[in-house]
Image (cartoon, grey):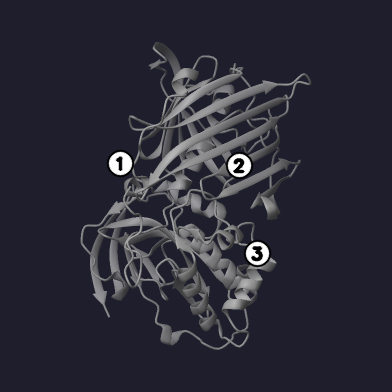
Amino acid sequence: MKSLIYMTKTKPSVILGIFVSIVFLILLAIRLDVFTKDNEKGALSQKAEIQRPAESWMNIYQKDKKIGVIHRQFIITETGKMHSQENVTMQISTLGTTQVLHLKMETDLNPDMSFSSFNFELNSSLFSFKAHGYATDDRLILFSGQPSSQQRSEIPLKDIPYVSGNIYEAAFSAGLEKEASRDFTIFDPSTTGIRKINVTRQADEVIPIMGKRVLTQKFCADFMGAKNCAWLSKEGEVLKETGLLGLSMEKVSPQKATEDMAVVADVDFAQIASVESNVKINEPEKLNEIKIKIDGIRNTPLFLNGGRQVFAQRILTITKENLTETGIQNHAIQENMRRYLEPTPLVQSGHEQIKAQAQKIVRPSDNPFQKTEKIVHWVYANIKKTPVLSVPNALEVLNNKMGDCNEHAVLTAALLRAAGVPAQIEAGLVYQNGRFYYHAWNLAYAGNWITVDSVFNQIPADVTHIRLTRGEGGVQLDLLGVMGKIKLEVLSTKYD
């Protein structure tokens, strides 16, 4: 296998931070036993009973290549409670490196299909993530993060969440008529994000499954502009699904599920998800301004306008921050910025180990800009740039000293906050070698907000960093609405 990283004197020649893992997590979360609920309690009265088999298998494909398998179990206990479990194994290639990803979701359901509790695990060859929680009458209680230091959080709920195996089974059990649509709300445990999803029942179709032609009910979901469809049997069992980036899943026999997965080095999801540039950009770090025409983002909740970015009439103008205008003295933190100093489940800036590391990097007498410079340079120099498929958290990155842009961004944010510098996480696209790749970086406040990138060791980050979202956790789900659809046309560039 060829080497992933080609180093120059200044920076890696490939983008290491790819948000492809989010695509897989959410595509699978839509069909895993995560919670679904309607806005009006009781609106989804069960009109069709789902005859879910006690055990079933599905293969996961990228086009015609098998890249994973799902083992699903459904148990009804003697007390009438229901327990659902799914184990997912996927072999994923990004930027020349192939990794095996394991996901496990266990859900306890009450007899009326209301949600009781869940356990979620994600493990790759390098990192692990766990989350568990339970629902009360008005809130979801969550515990997430690194197993040794999970943090508790709460999400308000208007109604008691309902689970019906997955969103399509919920639509089936509701007796959704042909051509009818209904909005649901889904929760993703990997990002703790809650989002709307619209499901439409389409015309019935006959499809081949396990050597037989089966009459199915077809449902399609619109998740923030990302389309996903499923075909269900007359008993309500999901037999087939299709989704983003050529991904699909299909019911198979246990014997077929045990067949080896494809060697997927030629199915590079970083490349598939990237966007081709119409021009070659030489030395992007020297650009002062770039103008880009953007299409394919209609009705998506992106954060394109603000700060160094101006978006009007489909034209995005990005101007590099002028550091001479950045205040270098210690400034009083405004009240509305204090939240960017607070720890979060994945940015554990309050942890003693994170605080101790920040104190080793900066001095108390350093001004905010000096602290930002030192921390960005330290993360760049000390974190090995390796593609990782997991849910990143700062403490684990600090201990493992490796990761892609997600890991760099959460650790940089945690160290900055621990050093008293407000910090945020941004995500979007960045130019490299003729294409725009999905990437994550940071925003630091040193008198003014500055865009910084600890993967490239840039302060400020170059103007080919196109911010699409800003924030943590569920905010990054907004990227799914544009993956595979966004189109970019570079109109002009200005150098220093």
358, above or below 26, in the image: below
- SS under mark 1: loop
- SS under mark 3: loop
The answer to which of marks 3 and 2 sits earlier in the sequence is 2
Amino acid type shown at disc 3: Pro
Instruction: Tell me what residue is drawn at x 55 percent, y 64 percent.
Output: 411
Residue 362 image offset from top left, x and y in percent: 58, 80
Instruction: Tell me what residue is drawn at x 36 percent, y 45 percent.
Output: 269
Amino acid type shown at disc 1: Asp
**Pointer 3 residue:** 343
In the picture, the disc for residue 266 is: 1
**Pointer 2 residue:** 121
Label 3 to label 2, Cα distance in Å?
22 Å
- SS under mark 2: strand
Horizontal side, residue 429 vs residue 478: left or right: left
The answer to which of marks 1 and 3 sits earlier in the sequence is 1
Instruction: Tell me what residue is drawn at x 53 percent, y 20 percent.
Output: 237
Label 2 to label 1, Cα distance in Å?
28 Å
* One can see residue 338 in this view: no
Q: Nearer the viewer, mark 1 or mark 3?
A: 1
